[in-house]
Amino acid sequence: MKRRKKMTTKCPSNRQKVKEQAKELKRLRHECTTDRVRINYLRATVLEKQQLINEQARTIESLKAEVRDLEVELTTKKPFWKRVLG
């Protein structure tokens, strides 16, 4: 009796294709979630920095206003007794 020689197929079977696709999908999902985590972290960091910058800008503006007030106070002529006594 002649035995039939098993031939290896050149193209992968459907099952092998599905397995490869599943591996690729798993890798892509993992990449996607790590990117999401990274994006969320960067977004939170940027928001925190922006709030800090806004706070510092408000402080600078209030200090500028205070300097302007002091300059006006210094440039106005006051009587001697007001300058000395306050």
Image: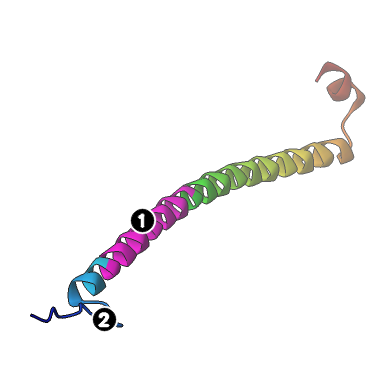
Q: Give the camera-side residue of 19 and 80.
A: 19
Nearer to us: label 2 or label 1: 2
Image quadrant for the N terminus? bottom left
Q: Give the camera-side residue of 27 and 59.
A: 27
Residue at the image point whose x is 46% and y is 48% from the top? 41
Residue 46: percent from left, percent from top: 54, 50
* Element on which disc 2 rests: loop
Residue 71: percent from left, percent from top: 83, 40
Pointer 2: residues within 10 angstroms few (<14), some, or many (20+)?
Answer: few
| Start-end of magenta stretch | 20-41
To which residue does mark 2 refer? Answer: 9
Residue 33 is a magenta residue: yes
Quadrant for residue 24, please give it: bottom left
Eyeballing the image, is 26 above or below 77? below
The kind of residue tagged 1 is His
Q: Give the camera-side residue of 31 and 40.
A: 31
Toward the left, the furthest residue is: 1
To which residue does mark 1 refer? Answer: 30
Which circle's residue, 2 or 1, is located before the other in the chain? 2
Pointer 1: residues within 10 angstroms few (<14), some, or many (20+)?
Answer: few
